[in-house]
């Protein structure tokens, strides 16, 4: 049985692959999407314990994704990933309902620790 089902939405293939390679061996069930549009389609078809969303993507950005997702399921836990770590971005993400944020680049250990923190695993 998996620890949790996670949706990773990022336009960078290397980030999606890295998340999947880190999380699957840890017992997580992972789906990935390369765009906000694809992410919304997957989100609408399945239930997720956590959605990881890149802040800066072409088309629908991370904050728009966050608002869309939380509009559909207000209880949904969403974590924003960003390589643009400014106070303004963090405040905007958290005030829009993000459960947490993750600065890029991140290590596998940091990814796992932050996800476990948000999901309350091992606490």
Image: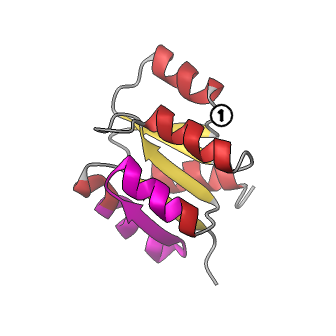
* Rendered image quadrant of residue 99: top right
**Residue 16: where, in percent of width, then height?**
33, 58
Q: Is residue 38 visible?
A: yes
Task: Give yes or no for residue 72 being in the magenta stretch.
Answer: no
Write down the region rendered in magenta: 17-43
Locate the N terminus by quadrant.
bottom right
Foreground: 65 or 53? Answer: 65
The residue located at (28%, 48%) in the rendering is 11
Left or right of 9 on screen, residue 120: right
112 or 35: nearer the viewer? 35
Farthest bottom residue in view: 1
Decide: is 33 above or below 79.
Answer: below
Residue marked by disc 1 = 97
Residue closer to the observer: 23 or 110: 23
Hey, which residue is sitting farthest top in the picture? 88
Q: Secondary structure at mark 1?
A: loop
Q: Residue at x 73, y 55 (%)?
A: 120
Visible residue check, residue 107: no
What secondary structure predominates along the stretch shown in magenta?
A: helix
Q: Quadrant of residue 58?
A: top left
How far across and how far down the image is residue 2, in percent?
61, 78
């Amino acid at each position: 049985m998996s620890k949790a089902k996670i949706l990773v939405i990022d336009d960078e293939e290397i980030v999606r692959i890295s998340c999947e390679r880190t999380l699957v061996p840890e017992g997580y069930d992972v789906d990935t999407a390369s765009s906000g549009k694809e992410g919304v389609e997957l989100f609408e078809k399945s239930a997720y314990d956590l959605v990881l969303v890149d802040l800066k993507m072409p088309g629908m950005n991370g904050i728009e994704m966050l608002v869309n997702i939380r509009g559909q399921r207000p209880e949904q836990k969403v974590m924003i990933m960003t390589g643009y770590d400014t106070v303004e971005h963090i405040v905007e993400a958290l005030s829009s309902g993000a459960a947490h944020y993750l600065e890029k680049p991140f290590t596998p250990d940091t990814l796992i620790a932050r996800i476990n923190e948000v999901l309350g695993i091992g606490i």
